[in-house]
Amino acid sequence: MKRTKLYSILFLKCPQCRQGQFLEAHPYKFLKMNKVKDHCPKCKLNYHIEPSFYTGSMYVSYGVGIAVAVAAYVLTLLLGFEFGPTGLLLTIIFALLITMPYIGAVSKSIWAHFFLKYNPEIAKKASNDGSA
Ligand SMILES: [Zn+2]
Protein backbone atom coordinates (compact mmCIF):
# COMPACT_ATOMS: atom_id res chain seq x y z
CA MET A 1 0.00 0.00 0.00
CA LYS A 2 1.47 3.34 -1.07
CA ARG A 3 0.93 6.23 1.30
CA THR A 4 2.02 9.80 0.74
CA LYS A 5 4.11 11.84 3.14
CA LEU A 6 1.18 14.23 3.65
CA TYR A 7 -1.07 11.32 4.65
CA SER A 8 1.54 10.09 7.07
CA ILE A 9 1.99 13.53 8.67
CA LEU A 10 -1.72 14.36 8.95
CA PHE A 11 -2.78 10.94 10.24
CA LEU A 12 0.16 10.79 12.65
CA LYS A 13 1.92 7.73 11.27
CA CYS A 14 5.51 6.49 11.47
CA PRO A 15 7.84 8.52 9.17
CA GLN A 16 9.75 5.43 8.08
CA CYS A 17 6.98 2.93 7.21
CA ARG A 18 3.92 5.28 7.22
CA GLN A 19 1.86 2.54 8.90
CA GLY A 20 2.61 2.30 12.59
CA GLN A 21 1.02 4.76 15.02
CA PHE A 22 3.20 7.69 16.03
CA LEU A 23 1.48 8.67 19.27
CA GLU A 24 0.56 6.67 22.39
CA ALA A 25 -3.05 7.75 22.06
CA HIS A 26 -5.44 9.97 20.12
CA PRO A 27 -4.43 13.69 20.45
CA TYR A 28 -7.72 14.47 22.22
CA LYS A 29 -7.12 11.90 24.98
CA PHE A 30 -5.80 14.35 27.49
CA LEU A 31 -4.08 11.95 29.88
CA LYS A 32 -1.59 10.84 27.27
CA MET A 33 -1.76 14.05 25.31
CA ASN A 34 0.64 14.00 22.39
CA LYS A 35 2.95 11.46 23.96
CA VAL A 36 5.16 10.03 21.23
CA LYS A 37 5.66 6.25 21.35
CA ASP A 38 9.17 4.89 21.99
CA HIS A 39 9.26 2.81 18.83
CA CYS A 40 7.14 2.26 15.77
CA PRO A 41 4.90 -0.78 16.47
CA LYS A 42 5.31 -1.83 12.83
CA CYS A 43 8.95 -1.31 11.82
CA LYS A 44 10.56 -0.76 15.26
CA LEU A 45 11.97 2.62 14.27
CA ASN A 46 13.19 4.54 17.32
CA TYR A 47 11.09 7.74 17.42
CA HIS A 48 13.36 9.42 19.95
CA ILE A 49 16.63 9.80 18.07
CA GLU A 50 18.06 12.03 20.79
CA PRO A 51 17.00 13.35 24.24
CA SER A 52 14.28 16.04 24.06
CA PHE A 53 14.17 15.64 20.31
CA TYR A 54 10.59 16.92 20.16
CA THR A 55 11.33 20.24 21.90
CA GLY A 56 12.07 21.68 18.47
CA SER A 57 8.56 20.88 17.33
CA MET A 58 7.44 23.95 19.29
CA TYR A 59 8.76 26.09 16.45
CA VAL A 60 6.66 24.06 14.04
CA SER A 61 3.55 24.41 16.19
CA TYR A 62 3.96 28.19 16.11
CA GLY A 63 3.75 28.07 12.30
CA VAL A 64 0.88 25.59 12.30
CA GLY A 65 -0.96 27.79 14.82
CA ILE A 66 -0.65 30.79 12.51
CA ALA A 67 -1.92 28.67 9.60
CA VAL A 68 -4.97 27.66 11.67
CA ALA A 69 -5.60 31.29 12.68
CA VAL A 70 -5.43 32.43 9.04
CA ALA A 71 -7.69 29.55 7.98
CA ALA A 72 -10.24 30.48 10.66
CA TYR A 73 -10.13 34.10 9.52
CA VAL A 74 -10.58 33.21 5.82
CA LEU A 75 -13.38 30.77 6.65
CA THR A 76 -15.21 33.47 8.61
CA LEU A 77 -14.97 35.79 5.59
CA LEU A 78 -16.05 33.08 3.15
CA LEU A 79 -19.08 32.17 5.24
CA GLY A 80 -20.01 35.84 5.35
CA PHE A 81 -20.02 36.32 9.13
CA GLU A 82 -19.64 39.90 10.22
CA PHE A 83 -18.34 39.61 13.75
CA GLY A 84 -16.40 42.85 13.93
CA PRO A 85 -12.79 42.94 15.21
CA THR A 86 -13.54 41.58 18.71
CA GLY A 87 -15.76 38.77 17.42
CA LEU A 88 -13.16 37.88 14.82
CA LEU A 89 -10.44 37.69 17.44
CA LEU A 90 -12.61 35.49 19.66
CA THR A 91 -13.39 33.23 16.69
CA ILE A 92 -9.68 32.80 15.98
CA ILE A 93 -8.91 32.12 19.65
CA PHE A 94 -11.74 29.59 19.77
CA ALA A 95 -10.47 27.86 16.61
CA LEU A 96 -6.96 27.68 18.11
CA LEU A 97 -8.26 26.28 21.40
CA ILE A 98 -10.23 23.45 19.83
CA THR A 99 -7.44 22.51 17.41
CA MET A 100 -4.63 22.89 19.96
CA PRO A 101 -4.22 19.18 20.77
CA TYR A 102 -4.06 18.34 17.09
CA ILE A 103 -1.69 21.24 16.35
CA GLY A 104 0.69 19.88 18.99
CA ALA A 105 0.43 16.36 17.60
CA VAL A 106 0.81 17.29 13.95
CA SER A 107 3.77 19.54 14.77
CA LYS A 108 5.62 16.62 16.33
CA SER A 109 4.67 14.56 13.31
CA ILE A 110 6.04 17.21 10.89
CA TRP A 111 9.19 17.48 13.01
CA ALA A 112 9.74 13.70 12.95
CA HIS A 113 9.05 13.49 9.21
CA PHE A 114 11.62 16.20 8.66
CA PHE A 115 14.43 14.17 10.24
CA LEU A 116 13.38 10.57 9.75
CA LYS A 117 13.16 9.34 6.19
CA TYR A 118 10.65 7.08 4.48
CA ASN A 119 12.01 3.65 3.60
CA PRO A 120 9.98 1.75 0.94
CA GLU A 121 11.74 -1.56 1.66
CA ILE A 122 10.93 -1.45 5.36
CA ALA A 123 7.41 -0.23 4.59
CA LYS A 124 6.86 -3.24 2.35
CA LYS A 125 8.10 -5.62 5.02
CA ALA A 126 5.94 -3.95 7.68
CA SER A 127 2.76 -4.21 5.59
CA ASN A 128 3.40 -7.92 4.96
CA ASP A 129 3.57 -8.31 8.72
CA GLY A 130 -0.20 -8.36 9.05
CA SER A 131 -2.05 -6.84 12.02
CA ALA A 132 -2.16 -3.09 12.57
ZN1 LIG B 1 7.32 2.40 11.23
Image (cartoon, helix red, strand yellow):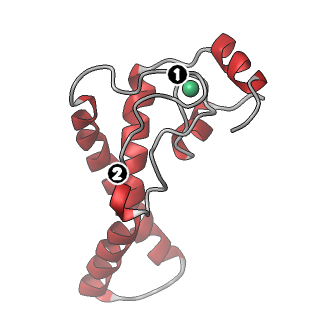
Q: Secondary structure at mark 2?
A: helix
Q: Nearer the viewer, residue 86 or 93?
A: 93
Q: Is residue 105 above or below residue 99?
A: above
Q: Position of residue 97 (x, y in %)?
A: 32, 70
Q: Could you tell me if residue 69 is visible in this image? A: no
Quarter holding ligand 1: top right
Q: Amino acid at mark 2?
A: Gly
Given residues 81 and 97, the one toward you in this image is: 97
Q: Secondary structure at mark 1?
A: loop
Residue name at image x 74 percent, y 24 percent:
129
Taking the spot 67% from the left edge, 20% from the top edge, the residue there is 123
Relative to 48, say whether 90 is above or below. below
Q: Which mark is residue 44?
A: 1
Q: How many marks?
A: 2
Which of the two discs, 2 and 1, sits closer to the camera?
Answer: 1
Residue 21 left/right relative to 86? right
In front of the other: 123 or 82: 123
Q: Is residue 95 left or right of residue 42?
A: left
**In which image quadrant can residue 27 be found?**
bottom left
Q: Is residue 41 visible?
A: yes
Q: Which residue is mark 2?
A: 104
Work out which quarter of the rendered image holds the N terminus and state it. top right
Measured Cα–Cα span from mark 2 to mark 1: 23 Å
Q: Position of residue 124 (x, y in %)?
A: 73, 18
Answer left or right for 50 relative to 102: left
Near-viewer residue (14 or 89): 14
Residue drawn at the location 34% of the way across and 67% of the way down: 96
Q: Which mark is residue 81?
A: none
Mark 1: C-beta under 8 Å from nearest atom of ligand 1: yes
When asked about the image quadrant of residue 16, the answer is: top right
Q: Amino acid at mark 1?
A: Lys
Report x, y in % for residue 106: 43, 46
